[in-house]
Image (cartoon, coloured by chain):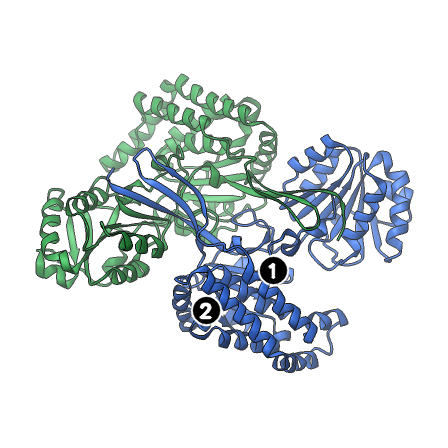
Chain colours: A green, B blue
Amino acid sequence: MENRLKELKKVTKKLQILNQNQRANLIQKIADAIENNIAKIIEANAIDLQNAKDLSPALQDRLKLDEVRIKSLADGIRDIAMLKDPIGKIHDGWSAKSGLKIEKISVPLGVIAMIYESRPNVTAEVAALAIKSANGCALKGGKEAINSNLALASIIKNSLGEYGGCIEYFDISRDEVLEFIRMDRYIDLVVPRGGEGLVKFVSANSSIPVLKHDKGVCHIYVHKAANIQKALDICVNAKCSRPGVCNAAECVLVDESIAADFLPLLKARLDKFSVKIHGCQKSVNIINCFEATDKSYYNEYLDFELNLKIVGSLYEALDHIDEYSSGHSEAIISDDYAACEEFLSRVDSACVYANASTRFSDGGEFGFGAEVGISTCKMHARGPVGVDELTTYKYIIRGQGQIR
Amino acid sequence: MENRLKELKKVTKKLQILNQNQRANLIQKIADAIENNIAKIIEANAIDLQNAKDLSPALQDRLKLDEVRIKSLADGIRDIAMLKDPIGKIHDGWSAKSGLKIEKISVPLGVIAMIYESRPNVTAEVAALAIKSANGCALKGGKEAINSNLALASIIKNSLGEYGGCIEYFDISRDEVLEFIRMDRYIDLVVPRGGEGLVKFVSANSSIPVLKHDKGVCHIYVHKAANIQKALDICVNAKCSRPGVCNAAECVLVDESIAADFLPLLKARLDKFSVKIHGCQKSVNIINCFEATDKSYYNEYLDFELNLKIVGSLYEALDHIDEYSSGHSEAIISDDYAACEEFLSRVDSACVYANASTRFSDGGEFGFGAEVGISTCKMHARGPVGVDELTTYKYIIRGQGQIR
């Protein structure tokens, strides 16, 4: 493993000398190669699907690659090739008192390791994002997708010619993963993308900096000045459009003064999706629902299940979010200017919305092309992570012989 | 400890509601209080100096606070108050396809813990930097400065009135430090500033993100097209002006074509400071010096001691730096445009210089006011860390009822 990582680091140095057009061309080659090998990919994927017969239909569907999906994957990769280049961007520049000219300029991180579960698309998407940002990448996918991942990795590597060594797929056991995430001499960043268990395991054991994609306990606060129709649409969208993702809402906070009118309307809409509601004592007095405990409010259900709480004021909503939110995404629904601004300013989460669904916390929706994931860290990158977040910076300083 | 940190986090929330003028006023109050309590600080410092009689004169000097130094500390803190406010800066903003208006805006990190050795000034400087960036701060200084630190911390807290709780000094044992650096519910960032042992201990044991101030194995590469006079001045300055700091040079690389002329001149200048030189085999043939081993080149001497290596080309210099540098600061001395640009672009260190001494890698010299330290991490902050690096960002998204 160490030798492969050493070689990966070495080839990555070569990649970093290329200009942006050359890197974009490499990404186009990945897209072409994927389209030219559809049959091969489907064949490998069929073995994974055969082995996955005991998994839930939803998981089987996530795993599945067909012609349409593979073509759409290739198109997505072409979009990444066309993104604005993230490298060599001058963030800042000034002349210091000494006369030195200082520039703060974006540069690649180095080698990025991605440990992910399920969807084999990630293999190709992350490879493309890495090359776009002039980084090498070490991939380790879930074992349920191993044949699809190996086929994709091999197609990608071949398409890159002498730069094929920038992408390495590691088919390793859990014990070896432990060794892998301590290879800080060769890897600059580890991104775990998957269930809570995986993220916790990597965070607890890695000696390399970790970009966490933690849980999303997202809140919608329906303020007393909310447009009721918008509030209903947004609550339903945030919970029900795709309950299994991290930007789905897990809790709706409703202002006390409108609760008696709003809750029955909300319940009627949620009942269409058979959403199981856990409400506070006051909610239970208004609608028929389960009673929530203090602990319920920490839950990320990732299912048709929702917490509900009636709050006396904006500040009670802010305090609740402060305590129970995972810092991912929260929204206020209100037509009141001051309330919206106060909420946007006070809430300490990666994405804070006024009058929109939390479901927009997504690299694609933000316009980043594909995303590496959504960070709940405060350090380095927060929220949707695109190619810009796969860079660091350095200072370039030009002098005329200055000494100090 | 947990209760104090909980309270610190709570008061920090109050601090974050203040506007920039109110925060700047708090910092002015710290400066005034320090100036008004010079006698008290000197008294406490005298006890530390009394206890430090067995330390080296250099360390005793670092520990010492007199009227001049305290006044200069107060002035430095007033400079921090006047810095451009790092909070609420809009890094980027755009309209997404959905019509959502997205802003990426700088916000405080939360609570910053600083674990430092020796100089008691740090107590006041970090408190001021934290308040400037609307962060709370948990301080833990070295035991040799405990009386000075406690006196300063108490003066600072008193000067802040109801916001005094934003600054907490922890007089705790090493065992308790272990507990401290796992308080990730209350602390957002730990900055160890001190010897290699401290940095390693914190990095290895913290569950909180760590901003490392690792060693500085800095290089000066004297290219064949170097202006010899400038090269000599810069090498001597980079090694001898303050050999005990991380931005001091530890190795000079000299182009083979000029080595026979340059090395004797360099040795003559270094001899004035009695610098012990460890040279490669080729150097030993030119000047009288110790022979370096491959391992020598990893050394951070922090003393009047220097590695020397003759290299055949710019690329050999780059390869050497790649292997032995700690990623802090490197410089090329050359009048050749292409060589300078190649060096500036290729070297992957926090600060890369053309024709200037590495000693300028410093928050003050960069114009950041005081500095928290110099980061050798690639994630979040790299190079001199000022108030801008004590922030994170969030996305503020304004909609008109958008659902997805």
- Chain label for disc 2: B
Residue located at (74% from left, 35% from top):
B316
Q: Residues within 10 Å of mark 2 (few under 14, many from 20)?
A: many
Residue B313 drawn at (x, y percent) = 77, 33
Farthest residue, direction top: A36
Q: Position of residue A269 (x, y in %)?
A: 12, 44
In this rendering, position of residue B51 left or right of residue A387? right
Near mark 1 (Cα within 10 A), the count class, few <14, some 14-19 or many ≥20, is many
At horizontal 18% and vertical 42% (from top left) the residue drawn is A233
SS for dot 1: loop
Foreground residue, B270 or B298?
B270
Secondary element type, mark 2? helix
Residue A339 numbered tag: none
The quadrant of the image that shows the C terminus of chain B is top left
Question: How many badges with numbers are in the image?
Answer: 2
Q: Earlier in the sequence, mark 1 or mark 2?
A: 2
Seen from the viewer's position, the closer of residues B281 and A365 is: A365
- Residue receiving disc 2: B166
Expressed as whole percent of the image width and height from the top left, the position of residue B216 reads: 68, 52
Q: Nearer the viewer, residue A24 or A55?
A: A24
What amino acid is at disc 1? Ala
Residue A324 appears anywhere in the view: yes
> Which of the 4 image quadrants contains residue B95?
top left
Question: In x, y percent, where is residue B31?
Answer: 57, 70
Please say whether residue B172 is visible from this viewpoint. no
- Residue at label 1? B370
Residue name at image x 13 percent, y 46 percent: A270
Q: Nearer the viewer, residue B235 or B134?
A: B134
Host chain of mark 1:
B
The amino acid sitting under disc 2 is Cys
